[in-house]
Amino acid sequence: MEDIRGNVKIALLLISVSATGLFAIGGLGFYGGQGMFTVASTTDENTIATITTGEFSNPMQVGVYLYINAIPFIDIEVDAQATWSEYTFDFNNALGTAGPYDSYWGGASTYITLRKNLFGLGIPLLGGAKIHAGAGYNMHSFGPLANLKLVEDIMGDLSAEPEFDEDKLVEFVKDNKVDINGYHVQAGLQFKLLMLDSFLIYRLTFGEFEDVFDAKSFGSLNLRLGFGI
């Protein structure tokens, strides 16, 4: 009887381990971080008026991610991300200077990445960890910075002092968003933080971003917390 009980326990343990292996096919969670770039001050002017935006740096980022490691030798990762930063702008015409006004710049991005585990290593306090690298395709929609077209759309008369309407500002951003596609490379450290599946990821994104912040690439760093599935 003792032998039978022992064999049953071993069988249940093997089934449990096998089931864990079958169902641990990926992970999902949330992340936060920063873009590592600067948007310089800009000036938009004509013979009637001028708008000057202030410089801002390192916008905040939040997102959700899902990765699947059911395919041998490669993982597929998809994440959706929101980026934003506060900035100010001034409006100047023959009546004088109005502002500074507070405003927000931001956008939404989707990243699709193929990544591969390179090697594992031991880290004090965190235990085992993995280093992975990947590359992929991305899609972005960024809102425009304040410019004279915004003032004309909102009030129609550049010679008067502007009175900005938040609803009209939202409509302007929707109608004048900048859509950009690109590619990226990234490197990450995967580790356990308490019961969470965690990643620290640096990503370098390439694309035609000159219309947004006068650059062909930008970096970002984010910390991800989630669960295996």
Image (cartoon, helix red, strand yellow):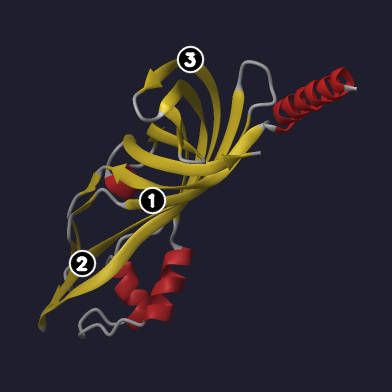
Q: Which residue is mark 1?
A: 61
Q: Position of residue 6 (x, y in %)?
A: 81, 21
Q: Kindly check if marks 3 and 1 are in contact, taking CB atoms under 8 A apart as contact.
A: no
For the residues marked 1 and 2, what is the alpha-carbon distance in whole angstroms? 19 Å
Q: Position of residue 29 (x, y in %)?
A: 54, 46
Q: Kindly check if marks 3 and 2 are in contact, taking CB atoms under 8 A apart as contact.
A: no
Give the secondary structure at mark 2: strand
Residue for point 86% across, 17% down? 3
Three-letter code, disc 2: Thr
Q: Is residue 1 left or right of residue 89?
A: right
Instruction: Confirm whether residue 66 shows in the render.
Output: no
Residue 28 falls in which quadrant of the image?
top right
Give the secondary structure at mark 3: strand
Q: Which residue is mark 2?
A: 88
Closer to the chain start, of discs 3 and 1, is 1
Determine crowd level at label 2: few under 14, some 14-19, many 20+ residues with C-alpha closer than 10 A. some
Compared with residue 80, is residue 143 higher up or lower down, i.e. above or below? below
Three-letter code, disc 3: Leu
Determine crowd level at label 3: few under 14, some 14-19, many 20+ residues with C-alpha closer than 10 A. few
Quadrant into which the C terminus falls: top right
Q: Which residue is mark 3?
A: 118
For the residues marked 3 and 1, what is the alpha-carbon distance in whole angstroms? 27 Å
Compared with residue 157, is residue 47 higher up or lower down, i.e. above or below? above
Residue for point 27% across, 63% down? 86
Q: Is residue 20 left or right of residue 162?
A: right
Compared with residue 190, is residue 36 higher up or lower down, i.e. above or below? below
In this view, the mark in front (3 or 2):
3
Three-letter code, disc 1: Gln
Pick the front one: 68 or 124: 124
Q: Is residue 99 left or right of residue 116?
A: left
Q: Position of residue 69 (x, y in %)?
A: 64, 27
Q: Position of residue 81 (x, y in %)?
A: 47, 49
